[in-house]
């Protein structure tokens, strides 16, 4: 494993070997490389991919300015990837990283060879948008906010009621060092919608989603795939949002598509 910083201050770490695969990481409290238990949990997804690729797990840069848009973020990633690789590269975006990956492919096709979007679609659902807004605004104001994520964790009213106090108690250990970074990224993703841009995306694209994803309904994955000119779709039966990235077939499906 190696760590470093790409152009525009984008932190990254690497695992594996082979052809490069840029992984745009999911929503993270800190715009930094993970450490401790967060790194151990994340490598459960990255290490299987590292058996096929030299994985560059890339995060957004710290110190995100107020008013930053997804197009701004995609532009900085395009500069960084062009400088680092000098040719189009395979890109995998997971969850919020999938939103960014679609924006990148739409705005900067010259840097994307093939694209995988996992646990994401051309826009957020109203529920996901509200959860991110409530969570990030509360934490940025110095209040506990993790309990606002309960609707995306519990499928029933009972499980949501059980998760809410647990998340509230866990909030202090999940606090970011700079809550404004995740707030401003959430604000950028809040208005993200590339539905009308999908037909112009030239990169062959794989959409991967879970049948029981609470953040995105399976129908939204299907619609995203249908609107892309060259796409494949995989829906994992009985699988949640987080479960998509840990699915036993995930790394193999990504590798098969990108090869």
Image (spheres, helix red, strand yellow):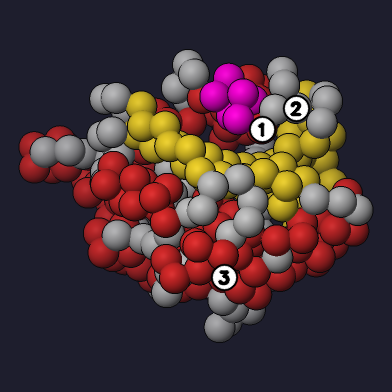
Secondary structure beneath label 3 = helix
Q: Which residue is mark 2?
A: 53
Q: Which residue is mark 3?
A: 70
In whole angstroms, how far apart are the C-alphas of marks 2 and 1? Answer: 10 Å
Q: Is 86 in front, or is 150?
A: 86
Q: Residues within 10 Å of mark 1 (few under 14, many from 20)?
A: some
Res 222 visible:
yes
Residue sitting at 64 percent across and 25 percent down? 255
Q: Is residue 241 magenta?
A: no
Q: Position of residue 171 (x, y in %)?
A: 39, 49
Q: Residues within 10 Å of mark 2 (few under 14, many from 20)?
A: many
**Quadrant of image for the C terminus:** top right
Give whichever of discs 2 and 3 has the lower sequence position. 2
Label of residue 258 in the image: 1
Q: Residues within 10 Å of mark 3 (few under 14, many from 20)?
A: many
- Is 176 drawn above or below residue 186 in the view shown? above
Secondary structure beneath label 2 = loop
Most distant residue in the front direction = 229
Residue sitting at 8 percent across and 42 percent down? 157
Residue segment shown in magenta: 251-257
Task: Report how many numbered discs are placed on residues in the image.
Answer: 3
Res 165 visible:
no
In whole angstroms, how far apart are the C-alphas of marks 1 and 3? Answer: 25 Å
- Dividing the picture into quarters, in which one does residue 49 lie? top right
In whole angstroms, how far apart are the C-alphas of marks 2 and 3? Answer: 27 Å
Q: Position of residue 66 (x, y in %)?
A: 57, 82
Q: Is 157 in front, or is 17?
A: 17
Q: Is residue 85 left or right of residue 223?
A: right
Q: Nearer the viewer, mark 2 or mark 1?
A: 1
Instruction: Report the magenta stretch's main SS.
Output: helix
- Is 197 drawn above or below residue 160 in the view shown? below
Q: Nearer the viewer, mark 1 or mark 3?
A: 1
């Amino acid at each position: 494993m190696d760590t470093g910083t790409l152009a525009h201050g984008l932190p990254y770490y690497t695992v594996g070997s082979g052809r490069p695969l840029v992984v745009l990481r999911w929503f993270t409290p800190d715009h930094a490389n993970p450490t401790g238990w967060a790194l151990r949990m994340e490598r459960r997804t990255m290490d299987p991919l590292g058996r096929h690729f030299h994985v560059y797990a890339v995060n957004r840069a710290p110190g995100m300015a107020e008013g930053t848009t997804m197009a701004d973020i995609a532009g900085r990633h395009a500069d960084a990837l062009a400088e680092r690789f000098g040719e189009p590269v395979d890109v995998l975006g997971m969850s919020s990283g999938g939103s960014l990956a679609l924006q990148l492919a739409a705005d900067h096709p010259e840097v994307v060879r093939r694209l995988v979007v996992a646990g994401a679609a051309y826009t957020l659902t109203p529920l996901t948008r509200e959860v991110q807004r409530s969570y990030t605004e509360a934490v940025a104001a110095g209040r506990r906010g993790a309990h606002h994520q309960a609707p995306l964790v519990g499928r029933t009213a009972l499980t949501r009621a059980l998760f809410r106090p647990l998340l509230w108690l866990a909030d202090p250990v999940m606090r970011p060092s700079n809550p404004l970074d995740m707030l401003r990224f959430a604000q950028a993703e809040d208005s993200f919608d590339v539905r009308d841009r999908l037909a112009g995306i030239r990169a062959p694209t794989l959409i991967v989603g879970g049948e029981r994803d609470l953040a995105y309904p399976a129908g939204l994955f299907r619609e995203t795939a249908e609107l892309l000119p060259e796409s494949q779709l995989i829906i994992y039966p009985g699988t949640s949002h987080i479960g998509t990235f840990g699915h036993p077939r995930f790394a193999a499906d990504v590798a098969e598509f990108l090869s």
